[in-house]
């Protein structure tokens, strides 16, 4: 009995233990649930709620794009439809590791792994909130530097600035009272991006939403050009799906700037396309003046004044008006401030100004005109020059371009390009397409100033048959017409054999040189190793001017005995101060006003005291005017790098 009694006690104890264990487990589970709820309400990092469950498949979120669209003649292979998350594992072509992902949740760890971005609850248009919270745990300076390397701007500063900051008023007072009709055409703002930083991309989107009147804004169309960065995948889709009027489409092939914009254009529904870089901020009232100009003439392509966001401080800098887009003979684009224009026309403050070219940062164009004039050139590689090609084509084929001063948009100008290109000669190849398709015989002037392009062109021909067909079918005018009618300010070099090319000095074995970046007003000339690239090209013309550089707008000049560059005269006879005579037999270049000769002075060739005075940079020497002798340092050759018959 005692034995039976002991067994019964043990059984009871066991039941009690089991009961206690069960109770403990239930308590733990309840605590966990409670804690999770608390975590949510305090919005601590961790998997956020999945708003998609509450808003089943938002209608304006297109996950992926394929190229079966007949409007797209991009020559792409047929693309299979992918699930978005499959895109998470596109291998990087840049040798950088893809950020670690946690599939199925919205937490994305950025490289460096000590900070995280958490997507938050839905944000609707017009709703102010802090949609993305950043948890910066011990963000070190080297991380900031890494981000700077990665993006070409100070991303850490950008992240600290509100996604919806306002800009100080920079428009001319005359713009503020302007009235626009209620019947302006609708706009699709097409924003292509490739590996854009979160803060700059979303600031662009919010800026458009906050400044564009809803009745004129058909949509903001985000086009992902096969980005690799994790934050641009599910987190972005999620975020965008809650922004009213914003659509996101993704390309499964890297298209480059032009191709990506053409893709966006094919999917856009607005009457006017506004192509915008993915790091812009719009000034109040920027859209209406652009739409009005396009509505008045559907072949007019327009751009706002491009203000500048500083890559380091993110400070907003208003650009001086008047400004227009130009390019030089190496096919480099510039925004050129031109205060002289204003002297001629005091009403110019609020009046649009025609522009030989427009930059690509923000450009508005009628959707049908964009298609009929041949979209962006699908043969252009990844990045660069697409805006110059579009500009020459628009003007030559019946359209026009202008900058509209009552519209201002700020663009973040990068410190350096954030992309690594697989093709080192990519820019040259894009330039070759422009030269061969649009510049007729004037292309020789380009090839002499870009010898790398010249040598590439000698071994391969661009495939421009389609573009030439387009040019014929549209009845486009030739480049001579463009130069004389649209862009008469561009100096047309004479490039006489023996009187143009690199200016080679026999005594020093170096070439006349000008440090780029000294500005349009000129500065001291130096000598440096001959580059052979065409960057040191200059030429003596019939007027006796030695015109320097790819614009040909700077002239060899003398300040006392120092040889410098200064702006060449426009519409005026050349003063003798800027006139030179080349004596082929002796190789002397004689300054006409002083009758002194151009001499290369090697570093160390001057007495110490003098050397310190004049040497401001680390080049191999400087240029001076000296009494003429037959010393080899006064002997010069104009060396043409591209033989006249080749160009
Ligand atoms: N971009 C793109 N695909 C590329 C390269 C660039 O979609 O292969 C986008 C980029 O994110 C930006 C726009 O095209 O929104 C223009 O590029 P970027 O700003 O680098 O040109 P920049 O302003 O320096 O001329
Ligand atoms: Mn840009």
Image: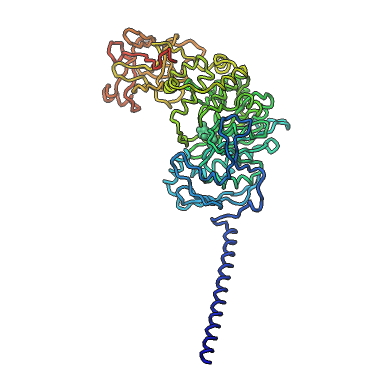
Report the label total: 0
| Quarter placement of the C terminus | top left
Identify the residue at the far right of this view. 182
Up/down of 281 relative to 135, above or below: above
Q: In screen coordinates, is 12 left or right of 54?
A: left
Picture coordinates of residue 324, whole percent (x, y): 56, 24
Query: Closest to the observer: 538 or 9?
Result: 9
Query: Closest to the observer: 200 or 22?
Result: 22
Picture coordinates of residue 116, whole percent (x, y): 51, 51
Up/down of 187 relative to 56, above or below: above
Identify the residue at the far bottom of this view. 1
Up/down of 545 relative to 378, above or below: above
Picture coordinates of residue 612, whole percent (x, y): 30, 26
Q: In which quarter of the image is residue 341?
A: top right
Picture coordinates of residue 28, whole percent (x, y): 55, 69
Q: Is residue 200 visible?
A: yes
Q: Can residue 578 be seen in this view?
A: no
Q: Quadrant of residue 268?
A: top right
Q: How is the image coloured?
A: rainbow
Query: Closest to the observer: 11 or 402?
Result: 11
Q: In screen coordinates, is 491 left or right of 168?
A: left
Query: Closest to the observer: 242 or 440?
Result: 440
């Amino acid at each position: 009995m005692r034995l039976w009694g002991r067994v019964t006690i043990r059984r009871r104890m066991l039941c009690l233990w089991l009961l206690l264990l069960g109770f403990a487990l239930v308590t733990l589970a309840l605590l966990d649930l409670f804690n999770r709820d608390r975590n949510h309400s305090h919005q601590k990092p961790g998997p956020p709620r999945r708003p998609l469950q509450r808003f089943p498949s938002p209608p304006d979120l297109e996950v992926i794009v394929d190229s079966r669209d007949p409007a797209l003649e991009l020559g792409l292979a047929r693309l299979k439809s992918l699930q978005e998350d499959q895109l998470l594992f596109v291998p990087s072509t840049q040798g950088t590791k893809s950020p670690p992902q946690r599939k199925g949740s919205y937490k994305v760890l950025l490289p460096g792994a000590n900070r995280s971005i958490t997507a938050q609850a839905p944000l609707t248009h017009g709703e102010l909130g802090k949609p993305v919270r950043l948890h910066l745990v011990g963000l070190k300076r080297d991380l900031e530097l890494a981000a700077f390397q990665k993006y070409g701007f100070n991303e850490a500063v950008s992240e600290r600035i509100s996604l919806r900051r306002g800009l100080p008023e920079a428009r001319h007072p005359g713009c503020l009272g302007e009235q626009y009709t209620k019947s302006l055409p609708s706009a699709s703002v097409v924003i292509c991006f490739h590996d854009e930083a979160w803060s700059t991309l979303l600031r662009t989107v919010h800026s458009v939403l906050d400044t564009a009147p809803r009745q004129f804004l058909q949509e903001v169309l985000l086009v992902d050009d096969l980005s690799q960065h994790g934050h641009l995948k599910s987190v972005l889709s999620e975020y965008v799906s809650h922004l009213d009027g914003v659509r996101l489409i993704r390309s499964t092939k890297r298209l480059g700037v032009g191709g990506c914009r053409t893709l966006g254009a094919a999917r856009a529904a607005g009457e006017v396309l506004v192509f915008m870089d993915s790091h812009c901020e719009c000034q109040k009232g920027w859209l209406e003046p652009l739409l009005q100009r396009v509505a008045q003439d559907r072949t007019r392509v327009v751009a706002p004044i491009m203000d500048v966001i500083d890559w380091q401080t993110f400070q907003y800098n208003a650009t001086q008006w008047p400004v227009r887009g130009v390019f030089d003979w190496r096919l480099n684009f510039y925004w050129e401030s031109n205060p002289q224009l204003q002297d001629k026309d005091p009403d110019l403050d609020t009046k649009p100004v025609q522009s030989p070219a427009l930059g690509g940062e923000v450009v508005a164009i009628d959707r049908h005109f964009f298609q009929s004039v041949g979209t962006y050139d699908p043969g252009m590689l990844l990045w660069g020059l697409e805006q110059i090609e579009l500009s020459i084509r628009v003007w030559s084929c019946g359209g026009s371009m202008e900058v509209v001063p009552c519209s201002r948009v700020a663009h973040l100008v990068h410190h350096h390009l954030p992309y690594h290109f697989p093709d080192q000669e990519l820019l040259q190849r894009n330039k070759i397409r422009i030269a061969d398709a649009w510049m007729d015989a004037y292309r020789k002037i380009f090839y002499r100033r870009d010898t790398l392009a010249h040598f590439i062109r000698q071994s391969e021909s661009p495939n421009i048959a389609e573009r030439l067909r387009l040019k014929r079918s549209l009845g486009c005018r030739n480049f001579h017409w463009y130069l004389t009618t649209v862009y008469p300010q561009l100096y047309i070099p004479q490039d006489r054999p023996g009187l143009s090319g690199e200016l080679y000095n026999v005594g020093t074995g170096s070439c006349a040189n000008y440090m780029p970046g000294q500005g349009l007003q000129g500065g001291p000339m130096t000598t440096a190793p001959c580059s052979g690239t065409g960057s040191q090209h200059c030429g003596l013309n019939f007027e006796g001017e030695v015109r320097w550089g790819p614009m040909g707008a700077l002239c060899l000049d003398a300040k006392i005995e120092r040889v410098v560059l200064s702006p060449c005269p426009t519409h005026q006879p050349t003063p003798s101060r800027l006139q030179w005579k080349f004596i082929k037999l002796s190789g002397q270049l004689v300054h006409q006003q002083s009758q002194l000769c151009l001499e290369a002075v090697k570093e160390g060739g001057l007495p110490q005291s003098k050397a310190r005075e004049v040497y401001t940079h680390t080049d191999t020497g400087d240029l001076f005017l000296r009494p003429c002798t037959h010393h080899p340092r006064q002997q010069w050759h104009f060396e043409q790098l591209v033989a006249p018959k080749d160009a």
